[in-house]
Image (spheres, rainbow, N blue to C red):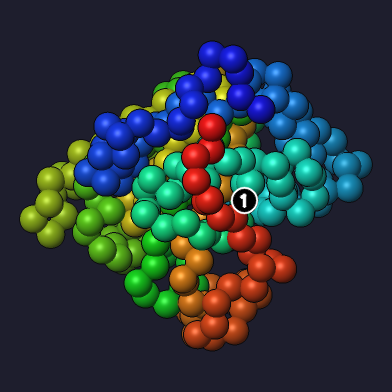
Amino acid sequence: MTSDASPSRLLEDTLTDAYHRDGFVRGQRLLEDAHADELHEIIREIVENPDHEYHRRVYDFKHAGRPLLHIKNMWKRYDAFAQLYRHPLLTEALHNLTGHTRFHLWQDRFFYKPANAGGIHTWHQDSTFLPFLPPFRTVSAWISLNGADEDNGAMWMVPGSHEWGDATDHMERLAEHVGAADQIPDVYQGHEVSRHLCPVPKGYVHFHDAFTWHCSGPNWSDRSRSAIGLFFVTADVRFDGENKWAKDYEGEHGQPLDTRFYPEVTYSGDAR
């Protein structure tokens, strides 16, 4: 699954330090081109073929009237996607970032921005939509399948924002800033706010914390932007059945996550 030129680790110590400081970091290459192309073609076929059995499951965020397409839980439908969340290099990276050894895959989602038309994703924190009792530790691993840059709608992150707590109300007010090129207020509760573009080459992995502020711009290019996001949470988490988003998921209030719906992965040592 990795190329001969790939490193033996996704995150060296300096990258782990950067993640803890900024709340995000781009790791090393995980997928060779042929493997990334295979996953991209699965997604492209689902999106573009109205007769595909999963086409009706495609959901369009349609922010600002432009398409941002996704489907949840590709791991349930394709072994090629299930192999990703079990990849030992990913599990090792999760351990390096959190110090934990056991994790649940909360869900995966593909994100697809069509060429010349792909839409934006407004400023948000992933934590807003997670029905977990605090405290919880989550890591999102975002794998680019055909390259993400400013022209085709790469993500923007705000360094350090993962340390500022729940900013849901503020994020909702920022929804009017619908493009990544728009400036957002430069101070939040005494914290300096700066935007950082996060291009991700094909086959590479970008990690970010659930509390990190981020968004993505429109796709103005003649290339689609295709990626798969894997959302992991440490296995000590408890389900919050009283959360307003809990109705969309399986779980009992105050209980651990059920591995039938949220498969578990374990870091057992050296991934090499």
Q: Is residue 110 left or right of residue 184?
A: right
Q: Is residue 250 left or right of residue 24?
A: right
Of residues 96 and 186, the one nearer the viewer is 96
* In the depicted structure, whether residue 103 falls above or below residue 96: below
Q: Is residue 150 left or right of residue 59?
A: left
Task: State the residue at coordinates (79%, 44%).
Answer: 78
Residue 47 visible (yes or no): no
Residue labelled with disc 1 = 108
Q: Secondary structure at mark 1?
A: strand
Q: Is residue 28 left or right of residue 71?
A: left
* In the depicted structure, whether residue 176 falls above or below residue 39: below
Q: Where in the figure is residue 232, as x and y percent of width and height? A: 51, 55
Residue projecting furthest to the top = 5
Task: State the residue at coordinates (79%, 39%).
Answer: 46
Of residues 207 and 110, the one nearer the viewer is 207
Q: Where in the figure is residue 163, as x and y percent of width and height? A: 22, 56
Q: Where in the figure is residue 146, as x and y percent of width and height? A: 60, 23
* In the depicted structure, whether residue 117 falls above or below residue 80: above
* In the depicted structure, whether residue 144 falls above or below residue 32: below
The quarter in which the C terminus is drawn is top right
Amino acid type of the residue tagged 1 in the rendering: Asp
Q: How many C-alpha atoms fall within 10 Å of the one at disc 1: few (<14), some, or many (≥20)?
A: many
Residue projecting furthest to the front = 269
Of residues 256 and 50, the one nearer the viewer is 256
Task: State the residue at coordinates (59%, 55%).
Answer: 265
Image quadrant assignment for residue 157: top left
Task: State the residue at coordinates (47%, 56%).
Answer: 101
Of residues 253 and 196, the one nearer the viewer is 253
